[in-house]
């Protein structure tokens, strides 16, 4: 039983959360009580239907931040690279990676990185404020709007990248939380 609980904790910390069912985590591996056999097939489920490919689309939005201030796509002006991180306050992996995202923002903002946190769960403003305070988040965090939703998947966290003109440059969204060093590799490649 302790192993099972440990596995669940590991899964919650290192995978993404489904936005369809908050309690369900996509493991991309079928779970069965039966021992695997040679005839057991792996689940080759194609989740590309929930992974939009918006490469080349222009990022356009007008929404509000947690304090009700209007934020538009003008916020990306002057940035070389925009990292749009879709997260939710109820998602453990999302919140768990936020301190690393803050460190990335602080370390790379002078090189032109803008991290834009985007959440969509209504009615959780107090929780969002608490998380932002606890994580000392200084990068902008905004509410999603219909224009931003096109870049979301059915999973959080999901991250896409845009260039200085607002063109989406990610060939596919990145689903799931990453460590500082994993994000750093991706960011440095885009900043070249």
Image: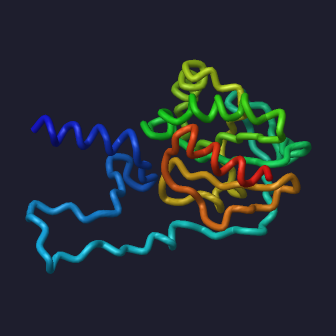
Q: Is residue 48 left or right of residue 108?
A: left
In the rendered view, tell whether residue 104 sits above or below residue 35. Answer: above
Q: Residue at x 72, y 31 (%)?
A: 107
Image mark count: 0
**Quadrant in the picture for the N terminus:** top left
In the rendered view, tell whether residue 126 sits above or below residue 9. Answer: above
Q: Residue at x 56, y 56 (%)?
A: 174
Give residue 40's position: percent from left, percent from top: 17, 75
> What is the residue that sits farthest to the bottom in this orientation?
39
Q: Quadrant of residue 28?
A: bottom left
Q: Is residue 178 left or right of residue 32?
A: right
Give residue 38's position: percent from left, percent from top: 14, 77
Q: Residue at x 71, y 40 (%)?
A: 115
Nearest to the observer: residue 69 or residue 2: 2
Q: Residue at x 52, y 40 (%)?
A: 179
Give residue 166's position: percent from left, percent from top: 83, 56
Q: Quadrant of residue 37?
A: bottom left
Nearest to the observer: residue 92 or residue 187: 187
Q: Is residue 27 left or right of residue 177?
A: left
């Amino acid at each position: 039983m302790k192993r099972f609980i440990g596995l669940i904790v590991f899964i919650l910390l290192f995978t993404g959360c489904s936005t369809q069912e908050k309690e369900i985590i996509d493991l991309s591996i079928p779970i069965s009580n039966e021992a695997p056999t040679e005839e057991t097939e792996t689940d080759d489920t194609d989740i590309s239907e929930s992974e939009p490919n918006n490469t080349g689309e222009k990022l356009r939005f007008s929404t509000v931040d947690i304090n009700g201030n209007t934020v538009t796509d003008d916020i990306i002006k002057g940035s070389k690279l925009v990292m749009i991180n879709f997260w939710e306050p109820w998602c453990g992996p999302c919140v768990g990676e936020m301190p690393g995202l803050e460190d990335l923002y602080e370390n790379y903002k002078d090189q032109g990185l803008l991290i834009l946190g985007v959440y969509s769960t209504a009615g959780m403003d107090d929780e969002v404020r608490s998380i932002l305070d606890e994580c000392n988040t200084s990068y902008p965090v905004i509410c999603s709007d219909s224009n931003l939703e096109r870049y979301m998947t059915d999973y959080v966290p999901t991250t896409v990248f845009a260039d200085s003109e607002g063109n989406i440059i990610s060939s596919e969204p990145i689903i799931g939380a990453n460590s500082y060093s994993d994000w750093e590799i991706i960011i440095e490649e885009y900043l070249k």
